[in-house]
Image (tube, grey):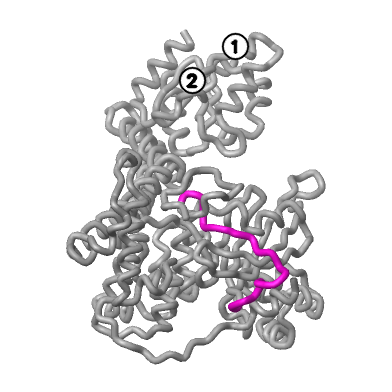
Amino acid sequence: MRRALRQGFIPAMSQRAPTTHVLTGTRIRERRLALSRRQADVARAAGISPAYLNLIEHNRRPVGEELVQRLAEVLEVPSEELAEGREEARIAALREAAARLPDAARGLAPELGQTPEFLARFPGWAAVLVATARRSEALERQLVALSDRMTQDPYLLTTLHEVLSAVTSVRSTASILSEGDEVSPEWRARFHANLNEDSLRLSTTAQALVRYIDSFETDGAIFTPQEEVEAWMAAGAPPVDEADDLASDAARAMAQEHLDCAAADRALLPDVALAEVAAAEPDPLRIAARLGRPLDLVMRRLAALRPWRFERAGLLVCDGSGALTLRQPAPGFPLPRPGDSCPLWPLYQALAAPQTAMAHLVVAPDGRRFSTLSHATRSQPDGTGGPVLTRAQMLILPAEAGQGAGSEASIAIGPACRICPRPDCPARREPSILGMR
Amino acid sequence: MALDILMIEDEPNIAEAVRFILSRDGWQLRLLQDGHGAIEEIRAARPRLVILDLMLPHRSGAEILGDLRAEADAALAATPVLMLTARGQTADAADQADAVLGKPFANDDLRAQVRRMLA
């Protein structure tokens, strides 16, 4: 397994020259909108500025093949689908649209064998069909997310309760003051102070609520506080008070906690010490041993510092319930929207065997391979009588071509059942909306 | 003097307004701002009426109500309870309450309800 990790830590490089693809930008934009992702978010993940991505999307800048590859990873599609001039990509898009027919239209039987002919004869109609299918998919995702948010979102429920409490207090207090009965000067002063306090609270909470709801519509996307934090991290974690990505109070609180934890980790394992050892040793277990630090700390610091060999490292962290508390993706790793995941990720195996490092090679539905190292820890912060808390981490690195093709078995993973195309997965818990391969 | 009302409400400004309204009507009222220790306080004070907020820190109003109804002392277990809730939250949580008042409420509705329950 160490062999697999070692190979995975060597980043692949591409030195191809940029070429101009007039329509590539349009494809990038269409794909981004279909995923309901913000331009700024995609730009940061691909390592370019939002302004530059905007120019690319409007076909005003040439885009090199290496950048197309990076954007394809971020947008979770094969790069061929973004490149211009590939009829196969258009045919694939039409087939995808046919595979995503709504349940009510399951009886329809599109002539898939004649897709190339249809595309050649009616390219305009084909484009309309694909755009409509993608728009439909984006709207469905938006609907599901909105529905989940309205019924389960703890931030929304808590904020509404806060508004209701302030309104109740204002109503009762204002009634007392306006009823005309005798109210002593002392009580009158207290009630005036209470009214002032409640009106301020109401104003602050209402503004936060409006900001939160506004964020649903940003660039056609829906963002949870966790997604806001991810966008903020992708932007280099600027100061919380100045971060445009952190629209909600919940996201700001989560970002601050992340900063506090990162600072504590950095104090325990400084950048210089980690970079020095990581340059000589690719195995996180050996790095931990050489530094005399726990493996979970080393994994978090490798993902945060991303020293040589670990530039493309990602990290997933979950609690004992399996809920992901940190999602720092590696390029191309199939990551779904927050709240969903694949039960076959080795991260979850680690939960069942704390204090044991597990190295696995995993393969995504598009064939990309990743080296993973998973490890869980247990703690009892409230003492021996308190609950046992388990936390698992999975360090992810894109694997090199051919890695794991020999004796090592790889685990076929996906993003989440709903958007996973694997038909025979033993862990499937719900049907996929994608056409099964 | 026997305690008429024990009010358990974590929002201090709501509690203050209610205390003013009901004290002015002549009721003896005591406030508790936390669900923690509520059942012990009810045992000790034996109020004639408990006004209970549903969402409280540490122990919810529903849990406190469940504990009260499970008391071995039948008279104590039958203490009348007026539950304060946000509309739509009543469902199962307030099933065991004698009456439910949705927030925000009119002061006169609260006064009338208390009068009925302490009559």
Q: Nearer the viewer, residue A436 or B99?
A: A436
Q: For numbered disc 1, what is the local secondary structure?
A: loop
Write the start and end of the magenta stretch as one range.
Answer: A400-418
Q: Position of residue A335 (x, y in %)?
A: 51, 61
Q: Nearer the viewer, residue A112 or A32?
A: A112
Residue B78 numbered mark, or none: 1
Determine whether label 1 and label 2 are within 8 Å by CB: no
Which residue appears at 24% of the width and 76% of the height?
A58
Residue A43 numbered mark, or none: none
Q: Nearer the viewer, residue A87 or B63?
A: A87
Please state the chain letter of the residue tagged with numbered disc 2 in the rendered image.
B
Q: Is residue B53 above or below residue A124?
A: above
On the rendered structure, is A335 left or right of A193? right
Q: Main secondary structure of the magenta part?
A: loop
Residue type of the residue flagged with mark 1: Ala
Residue A252 appears anywhere in the view: yes
Q: Position of residue A359 (x, y in %)?
A: 71, 67
Residue type of the residue flagged with mark 2: Leu
Residue A414 magenta-highlighted: yes
Q: Quadrant of residue A138?
A: bottom left
Q: Is residue A376 above or below residue A331?
A: above
Q: For label 2, count other residues whose C-alpha is less than 10 Å away and answer few (under 14), some (14-19) or many (20+).
A: many
Which residue appears at 46% of the width and 42% of the height?
A152
Q: Position of residue A139 (x, y in %)?
A: 31, 51
Q: Nearer the viewer, residue A343 or B1?
A: A343
Quadrant into which the N terminus of chain B falls: top right
**Label 2 sits on residue:** B82
The residues tagged by marks 1 and 2 sit, at their Cα atoms, a distance apart of 12 Å
Q: Are marks 1 and 2 on the same chain?
A: yes
Q: Is residue B92 above or below residue A143?
A: above
Q: How many marks?
A: 2
Which residue appears at 69% of the width and 87% of the height?
A279
